[in-house]
Image (spheres, grey):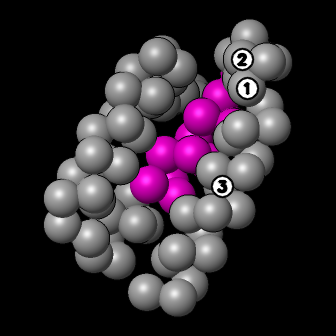
Amino acid sequence: MTTELPVAEISYLEAWLESFISSYSQSSNKQLLAKICLGVNAIMQHDDFDQLADRHCSYYKMKNYWLWRYQIA
């Protein structure tokens, strides 16, 4: 018997990411940076990421930016 983890809707992941970025702008810390990086990765690895074809480049840029911020924090 295999169990699969429930997959969140990509719109929920985007809302989750927005809330962490908003929180980070108010009080920056490394834990929020880690959550932001996880959120971007979760969106990019989501099965429905292809539906965001017009935003692929933005997410790759976001990933690089937030990873850089995490590494220098």
Residue 57 percent coordinates (x, y): 81, 37
Relative side of 22 to 39, left or right: left
Q: Which mark, by number, is residue 52?
A: 2
Residue at x-position 43% and y-position 67%: 34
Q: Residue furthest front?
A: 25
Residue 49 percent coordinates (x, y): 71, 23
Find disc 1 in the rendering and name its residue: 55
Q: Is residue 70 above or below residue 66?
A: below
Find disc 3 in the rendering and name its residue: 63
Tell me whether circle 1 and circle 2 mark residues in contact (CB < 8 Å). yes
Q: Residue furthest left?
A: 26
Residue 54 visible in image: yes
> Looking at this view, is 39 or 63 the one in front?
63
For the stretch drawn in magenta, the main secondary structure is helix
Residue at x-position 50% and y-position 77%: 70
CA gap, disc 2 to disc 3?
15 Å
* Residue type, label 1: Arg
Q: Is residue 18 above or below residue 40?
A: above
Q: Earlier in the sequence, mark 1 or mark 3?
A: 1
Residue 6 visible in image: no
Residue 46 percent coordinates (x, y): 65, 29
Residue 8 percent coordinates (x, y): 45, 22
The residues colored magenta run 36-47
Neighbours of disc 3 within 10 Å: few (<14), some (14-19), many (20+):
some
CA gap, disc 1 to disc 2?
5 Å
Give the position of the C terminus as an image quadrant: bottom left
Q: Earlier in the sequence, mark 2 or mark 3?
A: 2
Residue at x-position 74% and y-position 11%: 51
* Residue type, label 3: Lys
Neighbours of disc 2 within 10 Å: few (<14), some (14-19), many (20+):
some
* Residue type, label 2: Leu
